[in-house]
Image (cartoon, rainbow, N blue to C red):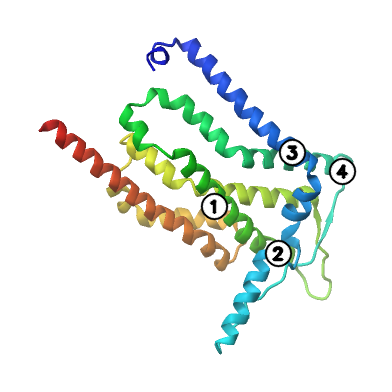
Amino acid sequence: MGEKENTSFFGHLLILRGHLLRMLLYVAIGAIVAFVCDEVVYDYIIFAPRSENFITYRFFCYLSDVINGMGVPVDICWKPAEFVLQNREVTGQFNSHIWVSIVAGIIVAIPLVVWEIWRFISPALTEGERRSSRGVVAYVSGLFFMGVAFGYLVVVPLSLNFFAGYHVGGEMEVDNLIELSSYISSVVNISLSTGMMFQMPIAIYVLSKMGLITSSFLKKYRRHAIVIILIISAILTPPDVASQVILALPTFALYQVSISIAQRIEKHREESEGKINV
């Protein structure tokens, strides 16, 4: 501990370089595995939302049967829109293979990446701060994976179903021939975006610890936060109210959790200050 505190600026840079190299190594290993197992990655993950057997479609069909069995005539069983994927570039499929492998490597390596970041930051924290931050790797990784899963299982199917099934005109219908790169970008961007949005409680925790934000501030601007959440949801989802609400609801729930986190930190800070004054 003492040696790290007395480390020079360039010494810290060397330590940081070591952590960055290890993070790149973790991502590279995950990317290589994903590259080799491309059939599994593409058939069972990337292209899975195009199949009627995708878990989301089967769940809604099952839920529809249950509701209808209760005597409520509601049909929420829906199937994916039909469209043709195409590649019009010589290096298109190879580039998508590389890109998907890198993204897969990043997602799989997130716990180790966060762990390396924590190892670099923790020596600068006090003993109390380290105790209160215990489990941060699990929390950050868990929230990220939950966000990615929510985006992939809920938002991605809704988006694909809306945009791929959208047609203009009447009798002269235009076929949807979707570029492979466009399809993959949609799946990847939505999944990663929701994964980042689910980091809100962690961001609020850090800002509250630093004294840059308070629970009263979060409560005061709750309505503004709702508007911002709806705007972000509108950007990430198809332009229909149902999709926006589906993404906005868990995000707003996380905002409420963030308020509780800020209150808990403030209470702990007040108790600590009270003990010091005594």
Q: Nearer the viewer, residue 186 or 126?
A: 126
* Residue carrying label 2: 54
Of mark 1 and mark 4, the one earlier in the sequence is 4
Of mark 4 and mark 3, the one earlier in the sequence is 3
Percent x, y of residue 63: 60, 76
Foreground label between 4 and 3? 3
Residue at the extreme bottom: 71
The kind of secondary structure element at disc 3 is helix
Percent x, y of residue 253: 42, 58
Q: Can residue 194 be seen in this view?
A: no
For the residues labelled 4 and 3, say whether their Cβ atoms are less than 8 Å apart. Answer: no
Q: Which amino acid does label 1 sit on?
A: Met
For the residues labelled 2 and 3, say whether their Cβ atoms are less than 8 Å apart. Answer: no
Foreground label between 3 and 1? 3
* Residue carrying label 3: 33
Q: Residue at x 28, y 48 (%)?
A: 263
* Residue carrying label 4: 89
Q: Is residue 88 visible?
A: yes
Residue 113 image-quadrant placement: top right
Foreground label between 2 and 3? 3
* Residue carrying label 1: 146
Of mark 2 and mark 1, the one earlier in the sequence is 2
Foreground label between 1 and 4? 1
For the residues labelled 1 and 4, say whether their Cβ atoms are less than 8 Å apart. Answer: no
Q: What residue type is labelled 4?
A: Glu
Q: Residue at x 58, y 48 (%)?
A: 193
- The residues tagged by marks 4 and 3 sit, at their Cα atoms, a distance apart of 25 Å
Q: Which residue is drawn at 59% across and 85% down?
A: 68
